[in-house]
Image (cartoon, rainbow, N blue to C red):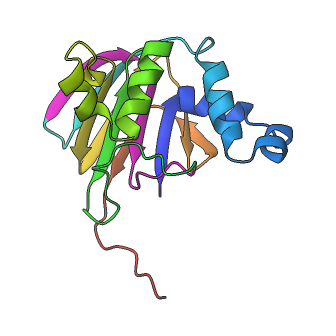
Amino acid sequence: LLRIGCGIEVGAVQEATRELKDQFGKWAYVFAGIRMLQETPEARYRIVINEKETIYASGVACVVANAGTVGVGRLTLAPSVDVDDGKLDLFLLKKANIEGMFQLASKMMGLERLRKEENPAVDASQLVTHYSVETVEIETDPILDIQVDGDIIGKTPQLIRTLPQALRVVV
């Protein structure tokens, strides 16, 4: 498992047609995601973290990642995402607009800290929330499709949990 998502990410997976992928490679997902900015409505999320903390929020995308790489250049969901830490990283994108995408891109490139020092008014935490979790339960209103590593496999609600060291890799 690399990434599970609902909202904009599902739309990007669906909109990244074979023709787009043949023409633009992995960038097809970026172009499809930008197109989905205008078409993805906000959903209401109920997120339970580690069976303890419940968060209620509106947003346009929710992503649970085990690995930070997004497959386009050196972009990562966040520099702190570590495939070996036994945890998952939860991201909630609260708004789908150019400012939100700019702030998300800054976070993905590790520029968020620098940007805060230069201009405290630019703060990605206002649009993107990031949690490190062992379990997460995601419910949405309306019910949304869920994609896992590029395949749509179900709908919300979903319970996602880590199984540390469950996979033995032989090289």
Any part of residue 93 in sight: yes
Count of numbered labels shown in the rendering = 0
Q: Residue at position x 29%, y 41% from top?
A: 136
Question: Image check: 127 left or right of 42?
Answer: left
Question: Image check: 144 left or right of 15?
Answer: left
Q: Residue at position x 18%, y 41% from top?
A: 51
In the image, 88 versus 19, the foreground residue is 19
Q: Position of residue 95 (x, y in %)?
A: 42, 14
Q: Residue furthest front?
A: 118
User: In terms of image quadrants, where is residue 57?
Assistant: top left
User: In terms of image quadrants, where is residue 66?
Assistant: bottom left
Q: Position of residue 43 (x, y in %)?
A: 44, 15
Q: Residue at position x 36%, y 28% from top?
A: 92
Q: Position of residue 169 (x, y in %)?
A: 44, 82
Magenta range: 53-71
> Is residue 65 in the magenta section?
yes
Any part of residue 55 in sight: no
Q: Residue furthest left?
A: 52
Q: Position of residue 80 (x, y in %)?
A: 27, 50
Q: Residue furthest bottom?
A: 171
Q: Residue at position x 71%, y 38% from top?
A: 28
SS assignment for the magenta stretch, majority? strand
User: Does residue 147 lie above or below 128 as drawn?
Assistant: below
In the image, 59 versus 101, the foreground residue is 101
In the image, 155 versus 3, the foreground residue is 3
In the image, 68 versus 9, the foreground residue is 68
User: Does residue 76 lie above or below 171 as drawn?
Assistant: above
> Is residue 167 in the magenta section?
no
